[in-house]
Image: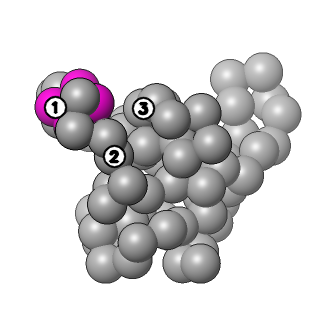
Amino acid sequence: MLNKSSILEVCNANEFVKVTFAKASGEVTTRRTSFKAVPGELEGKGMRSFKDDQVNLFDVDKMNWITVKVANVSAVVPE
């Protein structure tokens, strides 16, 4: 089972990571994320404090931060 620490560990160790999760609507989606490709003007935005059951990820395709419930994450795969 994935937890916040294991998700962040994979995301921090790899340049690009595909994260699969269920959205609030129930739709399952996969997003290409990266902590290393965050543009300078957006760097601090994702560092806000969130609940322990949430994780902030930078969506490379949308070029913005997204917040995902940890319990909804089903896969974290390095590219």
Q: Is residue 71 visible?
A: no
Q: Is residue 30 above or below residue 65?
A: below
Question: Which mark is first along the chain, 2 or 1?
Answer: 2
Q: Identify the residue position indicated by label 1 in the image.
A: 44
- The answer to whether residue 9 is seen in the rendering is yes
- Give the colour scheme of this rendering: one colour
What residue is shown with label 3?
65
Query: Residue tagged by mark 2?
Result: 38
In terms of image quadrants, where is residue 75?
bottom right
Residues packed near mark 3 inside 10 Å, few (<14), some (14 to 19) or many (20 plus): many
Say what amino acid the circle numbered 3 marks.
Trp
Q: Which residues are magenta?
A: 42-46
Marks 3 and 1 close (CB-CB < 8 Å): no
Residue drawn where x is 54% and y is 78% of the image: 78
Name, please, the residue furthest toward the right.
27
Compute the Cα span from label 2 to label 3.
Answer: 9 Å
Q: Amino acid at mark 2?
A: Val
| Magenta highlight on residue 43 | yes
Q: Is residue 21 above or below residue 68?
A: below
Helix, strand, or loop for circle 2? Answer: loop
Q: Could you tell me residue 72's position as x and y percent? A: 60, 44
